[in-house]
Amino acid sequence: MRLTQYFPLILSIILLTGCFSKPGVQEGYYENGKFYYWNGSMGVGDLVTEKKEGEWRFYNEMRQKISQGTFVQDSMLGHWQFWYAGGTLESEGDFNNNRRVGFWKFYHPNGAQMSEGSFEKAERVGKWTFWYDTGQMQEVRRYANGLNYLLNSWYPDGTPMVVDGNGNFEYYWQGNLAEVGAYQDSMATGHWQLFDANGNVRDEIDYVKGVPQNRDTPQ
């Protein structure tokens, strides 16, 4: 029902936990456990018995810092920060054994806050709040048992959309209409349409109490 907003972070985590773990096979150079490169990117930190240890910083091919945090025995642990290529903070929060835990914040490329909420074992839990890149509140959702429930949502101009879990729903991504449907008792209901960046219908789904009944993709 929602478009994922966190692909850059997911990709960064994959790179951090896998691509930099074995020196000697990357492009560039490796010297005393301090610096090495992989496909134009760079990691800076200590290796102990070929495992990342302590604070590490990672850079893209333009030598811009894209992430920083701590490893223990090659696993991400404690507080981490991620940046967009332009240098704006993208997200920050804690890891435990490579999994997001605790309270996290995510930001739009313009620096405005995008969302905040908590993770348990890399799954969203409890109340999450989302904002448009203008600073206007967008949604409030509750996550439990792998499901999410829409409590309230607003149009970009601040007009209420879904109130107390009920109402017609529109979802905007980067200024474009991405989804149209309805909620009842905080769960998706009825016929939904999903749109691509050009405004064309890319998928249609029917929901009953939040459960999709079909997935018809226009030809």
Image (tube, grey):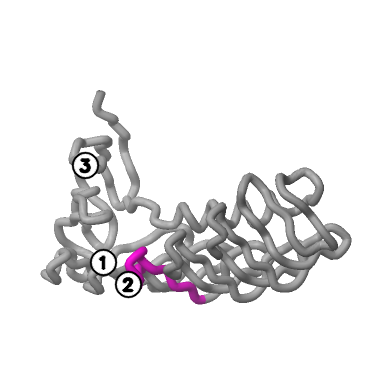
Give me the residue at 28% from left, 31% from top.
216
Mark 2 crowd level (few <14, some 14–19, many ≥20, 10 Å Cα): some
* Contact flag, marks 1 and 2 (Cβ < 8 Å): yes
Q: Which residues are magenta?
A: 103-114
Tell me the residue that label 3 is attached to. Answer: 193
The C terminus - image quarter: top left
> Three-letter amino acid code at disc 1?
Tyr
For badge 3, the amino acid type reads Gln
- Picture disc at residue 73: none
Relative depth, front residue between 213 and 32 = 32
Name the secondary structure under disc 2: loop
Give left or right: position of 194 versus 15: left
Q: Is residue 148 above or below residue 18?
A: below
Q: Which mark is residue 132?
A: 1
Residue 19: say if magenta: no
* Location of mark 2 (residue): 112
Residue occupying the point 21% across, 51% down = 176
Numbered label tally: 3
The mark closer to the camera, 1 or 2, is: 2
**Where is 162 relative to 37, above or below?**
below
